[in-house]
Amino acid sequence: MKWVPADIEMYLQAAEYVDTAIIPLLPIDLEDGMKDSATKTEFATLLSGFLERQFRGRVILMPGIPYQKGMEDNVLPQLEEWNKSLGKVSLRHVFFITSDLAWKQREDKIGGNLLWVPSLPLQQMDERSKTAALEDQAAQLMSLFAQKWEESDTV
Amino acid sequence: MSKNRVSRRQFLNYTLTGVGGFMAAGMLMPMVRFAVDPVLKANAAGDFTATKLNVDKITKEPQRVDFTFEQKDAWYESEVTNTAWVYKNDEGKIVALSPVCKHLGCVVAWNTDKNNPNRFFCPCHFGLYEKDGMNVKGTPPLAPLDEYPYKVKDGILYLGKAKPRKEA
Ligand code: FES
């Protein structure tokens, strides 16, 4: 489900089936890394969208969190907050999806699950190989989701 | 000297006309959409889309077929990829099932759960469907998978818009 009224209506009726939130972390670099940060933002956005389509009955895809490069440490407490508040409404699995390496280095401080995926040069690909590449990456993430769910469902 | 000054009344007049203009535009836009919509619908939904699948490559084992078409949304066109699970049933008839779980809309796949071979499996809440798309009682889905109408032209499979089926 996405953060749009129609999906939220569905969520409100089926909340007991929805226990997972996806939050894309989207870097914005206003200096030399402008294009690189745009690539990473696009990639994390596409990937999250793909996952939402696969798992739309159990997952809410939140609007992504944009942040300026270099400000990651200021954003960290926010992520913990999200983790806590979402947990309170029974969204007990929180996945932060990003292509920005800065988060990989802070993984243990994030609290939720960090899914760091290196971005691909989508710009140089045609439509078909783009989809194939995305699906490839997504398939790995999907098994991670399934694994987390299985662990928690069997408890 | 005060000729060019805008009086309070004029000022209100200007601003309110401005706001009114916006509101009028807001009312007009939906109407334009109504006028245009039927055209969009005719070529987006009514037609069959060619898949890349040759009909003699269809076996009794469901295979995943992706097909892409242009979809016109309110204000932009986009390429949409749909998926179907395609196979021939025991009578030799082609069956094309939608992968969208009838519970809450996750994507199901054929034969992916070890404990339930030869069934469609939904990873979200472990929904199950038989090969013919019928939902398995006791799992969350309450209806069978939607089915695509199909056509065969020059040996190629064409799929229409998936439709719900009657319950088991
Ligand atoms: S969405 Fe498929 S079982 Fe719930």
Image: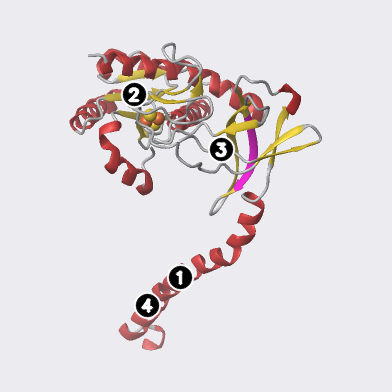
**Mark 3 — on which chain does it sit?**
B
Helix, strand or loop under label 3? loop
Name the mark on residue A95: 2
Q: Disc 4 versus disc 2: distance between alpha carbons?
A: 48 Å
Contact (Cβ within 8 Å) of mark 1 with mark 4: no
Q: Disc 3 versus disc 1: distance between alpha carbons?
A: 39 Å
Residue span colored magenta: B66-71
Query: Does the stretch in magenta take in B67?
Result: yes
Name the mark on residue B27: 1
Chosen colour scheme = secondary structure
Q: Give the image quarter of residue B64.
A: top right
Contact (Cβ within 8 Å) of mark 3 with mark 1: no
Same chain assignment for discs 1 and 2:
no
Does the closest atom of ligand 1 sit within 8 Å of the Cβ of label 1? no
Residue B12 % position (x, y): 34, 80
Residue bearing mark 4: B16
Q: Disc 4 versus disc 3: distance between alpha carbons?
A: 54 Å
Helix, strand or loop under label 1? helix
Residue A52 % position (x, y): 43, 32
Farthest left residue in view: A88
Farthest right residue in view: B154
Going from the N terminus, do you reach mark 4 or mark 3 first?
A: 4
Residue at x-position 67% and y-position 52% = B43
Q: Quadrant of ligand 1?
A: top left
Taking A30 as reference, is A122 left or right? right
